[in-house]
Image (cartoon, helix red, strand yellow):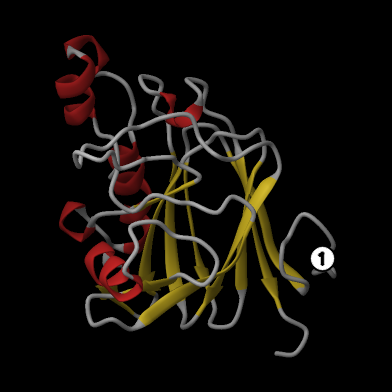
Amino acid sequence: MTTVVATPALVPGTVVLDETVGRRGPWSTVVAAGDVLTVVDLDGNQAVDTLVYDAHDTSSRYSAAATVAAQENLFLTTGSMLRDADGTALMTLVADEVGNHDTVGGACSQESNTLRYGHHTKHQHACVENFLVEGARWGLGKRDLVSNINFFMNVPVEADGTLGIVDGRSAPGRRLALRADRDVLVLVSNCPQINNPCNGFDPTPVRMIVTRPESR
């Protein structure tokens, strides 16, 4: 049974989905055109690695290059459109309580953990593995993974062009809202990384709420 949402969804409407993604876990759903996905950083400082595909043609998918080029900004905030390689909007960030989300830091993997942090980390579950596990439910494989968005993750670009991964800008309960501009498949890894500050060295759950505006 659906209900009319109050908080914590950012855009008023009828709740069609309300789920908590466990710490370190994967998640996915199809968001219908016009519906709004609110992502809630329940405990703060939790990176949410995200990929977006056209629900009816997954070869049309989020393109970091097209998104960044169109907005002339590496970072995402209110008004940013997540675009496919043709420049067509998949989703639009319609509300944001954080103000800065990463497009270039990528997803951690067992291989990158080993390279960055030492062979002793190879056994650790990582975002690429989450994407592969969850993507398989929709017929997606490794070739379908592209550069992802890291919501709530703070990756500053230094003056010399180097990237940092530092404490996040988020806080407990902060939210962002994405409107689907067409039917989209949203694939998430609630980042399990414990070797850098992207999750405060302590991954925590997040909440995913899909609302349908009353005007639809």
Q: Quadrant of the N terminus?
A: bottom right
Which residue ends up furthest to the bottom in the rendered image? 216
Name the residue that disc number 1 marks: 5
Amino acid carrying mark 1 in the image = Val
Q: Position of residue 46 (x, y in %)?
A: 53, 36
Q: Position of residue 108 (x, y in %)?
A: 29, 35
Query: In the image, is 117 to the left or to the right of 214?
Result: left
Q: Residue at 54% across / 78% down in the picture? A: 32
Depth check, front residue: 41 or 122: 41
Dot 1 crowding, Cα within 10 Å, few <14, some 14–19, many 20+:
some
Query: In the image, is 106 to the left or to the right of 208?
Result: left
Which residue ends up furthest to the top in the rendered image? 120
Q: Residue at 43% across / 68% down in the picture? A: 185
Q: Residue at 31% across / 33% down in the picture? A: 164
Q: Residue at 52% across / 76% down in the picture? A: 180
Depth check, front residue: 40 or 24: 40
Q: Position of residue 71 (x, y in %)?
A: 35, 72
Res 58 → quadrant: bottom left
Which secondary structure lies at badge 1?
loop
Depth check, front residue: 172 or 32: 172
Query: In the image, is 156 to the left or to the right of 26?
Result: left
Which residue ends up furthest to the front in the rendered image? 159
Q: Position of residue 208 (x, y in %)?
A: 62, 54
Identify whether 32 is placed above or below 98: below
Identify whether 38 is placed above or below 193: below
